[in-house]
Image (spheres, rainbow, N blue to C red):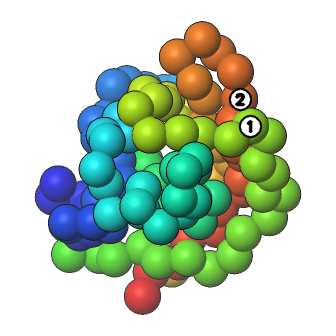
């Protein structure tokens, strides 16, 4: 929570499960509870976890990864700079448990910046989405 300022509805990351800086790998989880704010309106009768929130979840774990990799101070906020290669491969419904895994492709501490490539995966290993996220210090 010290590295991720998002709160309430916009806290999209449930936990960090694994952070291995020497191997440049982070794995987190997102547990989709029934009754979350998006469920009622997206889409009535078949609630699907919005793609924009899937990307937000990946961005939150990417930012935490970059904070540790670049040894940034707690107050540094890493925001979106760009999105590339975003793909939504499978619909995701309320009640699912997801993993998010990714690696930093490029990073700079001089002007805090990172490019992170990650995936959102179901517990059974099925990839549901992927993105390359660029984060910059705001």
Left or right of 43, for residue 11? left
Q: Is residue 110 visible?
A: no
Give neighbour class at mark 2: few <14, some 14-19, many 20+ (Cα, 10 Å).
Answer: some
Quick one: quadrant of the C terminus? bottom left
Tag 1 secondary structure: loop
How far from the left and from the top, in percent, is residue 76?
29, 76
Left or right of 74, for residue 113? right
Tag 2 secondary structure: strand
Q: Nearer the viewer, residue 59 or 113?
A: 59
Disc on res. 90: 1
Q: Which residue is mark 2?
A: 127
Farthest residue in the bottom direction? 138
Labelled pair 2, 1 in contact (Cβ < 8 Å): yes
Farthest residue in the top direction? 124
Quick one: quadrant of the N terminus? bottom left
How far from the left and from the top, in percent, is residue 62?
49, 53
Q: Nearer the viewer, residue 104 or 91?
A: 91
Q: Residue at x 70, y 21 (%)?
A: 126
Of tags 2 and 1, the one toward the viewer is 1
Q: Residue at x 72, y 53 (%)?
A: 131
User: Is 100 placed above or below 79 here?
Assistant: above
Disc on res. 56: none
Left or right of 128, for residue 107? left
How far from the left and from the top, in percent, is residue 23?
54, 25
Give neighbour class at mark 1: few <14, some 14-19, many 20+ (Cα, 10 Å).
Answer: few
Badge 2 or badge 1: first in the primary sequence: 1
Total residue callouts: 2
Q: Residue at x 59, y 65 (%)?
A: 52
Q: Residue at x 45, y 29 (%)?
A: 96
Left or right of 130, for residue 39? left
Q: Nearer the viewer, residue 89 or 26?
A: 89
């Amino acid at each position: 929570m010290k590295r991720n300022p998002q709160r309430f509805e916009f806290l999209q990351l449930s936990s960090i499960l694994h952070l291995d800086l020497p191997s440049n790998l982070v794995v987190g989880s997102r547990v989709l509870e029934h009754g979350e704010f998006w469920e009622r309106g997206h889409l009535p009768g078949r609630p699907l976890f919005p793609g924009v929130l899937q990307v937000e979840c990946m961005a939150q774990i990417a930012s935490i990864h970059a904070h540790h990799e670049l040894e940034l101070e707690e107050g540094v906020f890493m925001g979106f700079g760009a999105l590339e290669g975003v793909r939504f491969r499978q619909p995701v419904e309320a009640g699912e448990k997801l993993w998010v895994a990714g690696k930093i492709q490029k990073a700079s501490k001089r002007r805090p910046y990172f490019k992170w490539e990650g995936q959102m995966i179901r517990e059974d290993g099925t990839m549901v989405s992927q993105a390359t996220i660029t984060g910059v210090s705001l």
